[in-house]
Amino acid sequence: MAKKSPIPDDAPTAASLPACFANVKPDARRLEAGDMLFRQGDKSFGMFRLATGRIRLLRSTPGGADMPMHTVRAGELFAEASLFSERYHCDAIALQRSEVLVYPKAALQHALRQDPDALWAFAAELAQRVQGLRTRLELSRIRSAPERVLQALRLRCDASGTWKPDATLKRFAEEIGLTHEALYRALAALEREGRIARRDEEFTLR
């Protein structure tokens, strides 16, 4: 069960952003791994920013299958569509111990209507999300598993050409639309070809 408590104005977040959004002060909800923040079909009550931890968004298909939509990382806004919808369109489940900032729907709607600067910042963040979704779509269109993995690594590597995953490789596989078995085979092929090096869970482009 999610625990609700006030969050002080100076409470740190993983994104090093002010707790308030458009001058709306959030509540903090602390989730243990496996806790549900909301379920598909629940009446929407707010928008969220993940302060710490990891949240997975899943949508249930008519056939009863769970379709992963997105893995929320610390600092990200999520469930933005709740500001324009009566119901949540997916489940939100904590993958690990997490803290979520909850911005009440009515208060945030009112604040954004009154504050053009906050509305502009909100629009900019939504645009970044769209860019991220476009990148994932482009990756999914690369049919060769090794080439898809290589491109995903290029996008994640720092200026020195290295990347250390902050989650499991199984999660990485899910994010780029591969089974974890296909990911491991692709990584092995890239290593054999000398296109990447892997050491202590860190990847380096060659």
Image (cartoon, grey):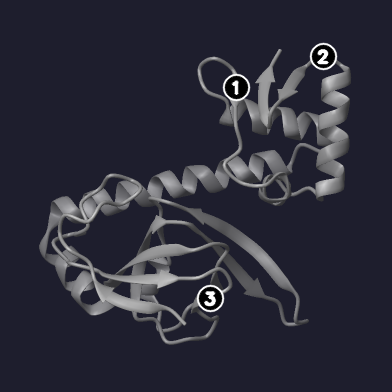
Report, in whole angstroms, how far the alpha carbon at label 3 lies from the one at label 1. Answer: 34 Å
Q: Position of residue 39 (x, y in %)?
A: 53, 81
Can you say which quadrant of the picture contains the C terminus? top right
- SS for tag 3? loop
Return the mark for residue 162.
1
Q: Position of residue 61 (x, y in %)?
A: 71, 77
Which is more N-terminal, label 1 or label 3? Answer: 3
Report, in whole angstroms, how far the alpha carbon at label 2 lies from the one at label 1. Answer: 15 Å
* Residue for point 72% across, 27% down: 150
Tell me, yes or no, if residue 34 can be seen here. Answer: yes
Which is more N-terminal, label 1 or label 2? Answer: 1
Q: Amino acid at mark 1?
A: Thr
Return the mark for residue 194.
2
Which is more N-terminal, label 2 or label 3? Answer: 3
Q: Amino acid at mark 3?
A: Asp
Q: Quadrant of residue 198?
A: top right
Residue at the extreme front: 200
Q: Amino acid at mark 2?
A: Gly
Circle 3 Cα neighbour tier, 10 Å, few/some/many (<14 / 14–19 / ≥20): some
